[in-house]
Image (spheres, helix red, strand yellow):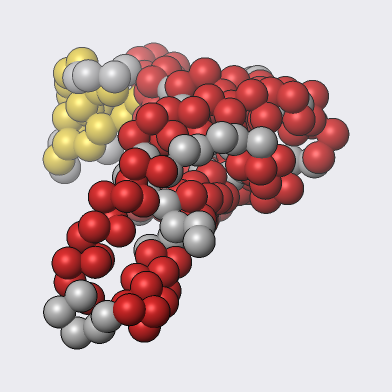
Amino acid sequence: MKIIRYQKQKCGMYLLQTESGTFSLHEDLILKHELLLRKEISEEERRALEKENQEYQAYDICLQELGKKLRTKRELREFLTKKGYLSSQIDSVIQKLQMQGYLDETIYRNSFFHDRILLSKDGPLKIEKELLEKGIPVDASFTESLFSEDLELERIEKIVSKLVKKNKDGYRKFQQKTHYYLTQLGYHSHLIDIVLNRTELDDTDLYQKEYQKVFRQLSKKYSGQELEYKIRQKLYQKGFRN
């Protein structure tokens, strides 16, 4: 089968026109198999070339992805699988990228941690979980080297300080909601407790407003000591200290 014409396309690809039709090949494959010199291939060679070409395409789109942001092996594997590439092709591409230094997961892990520390409110446990989901396990000593206990306490205090200023709940409810929120962000429970226990929250004004509101509601049904008991019970349920 004679190759009649080569037409350059995007991303290093060429469209080859033959006597029986056209097909696309990566320029590296054209050079590798010396197609510019012999300009003739069999149908069997063409099928083999098209199969090999898929691997080259997979490699190129991985490089494009890595040019946008760092990726893990798992992320690239999932990416190529969605694109429809075979497992054997994916394995070959991942191995090639790893050998060329594009998939250094130590660099990825460090960069991921630093970005999360600088650009988010996330705590160490959440960052570790996200890395694990990306296929990168993290040991405790590594986390502590980048996210020390002092840093964690400092970040918790900053978050709690902002929440205190916006608070509209009683002391107990504030503590419960804040503890849950910080746990979801990935901070250690015992460090959250340390900060919350030394955080001053004056809910006196809120208590008085809520007391008057509850009094107006319950005084229609109760009076005397029973009314006072019901009010205190209601306020306790709302997170106020009695």
Residue 30 in view here: no
Between residue 31 and residue 239, name the one nearer to us. 239
Picture coordinates of residue 168, whole percent (x, y)? 32, 45
Which quadrant of the figure has residue 96? top right
Quadrant where the N terminus sits is: top left
Q: Residue at x 39, y 79 (%)?
A: 225
Residue 209 in view here: yes
* 34 is higher (above) or lower (below) than 186: above
Q: Residue at x 21, y 60 (%)?
A: 213
**Residue at the far right in the pictured view:** 141
Count the numbered circles shown. 0
Which quadrant of the figure has residue 54? top left
Picture coordinates of residue 124, whole percent (x, y)? 64, 37
Between residue 92 and residue 127, name the one nearer to us. 127
Picture coordinates of residue 7, whole percent (x, y)? 17, 18
Between residue 189 and residue 235, name the one nearer to us. 235
In this image, 144 relative to 216: left or right? right
**Residue at the far front in the pictured view:** 224
Picture coordinates of residue 21, whole percent (x, y)? 15, 40
* 9 is higher (above) or lower (below) than 105: above
Q: Residue at x 58, y 29 (%)?
A: 157
Q: Residue at x 71, y 40 (%)?
A: 194
In this image, 141 relative to 188: left or right? right
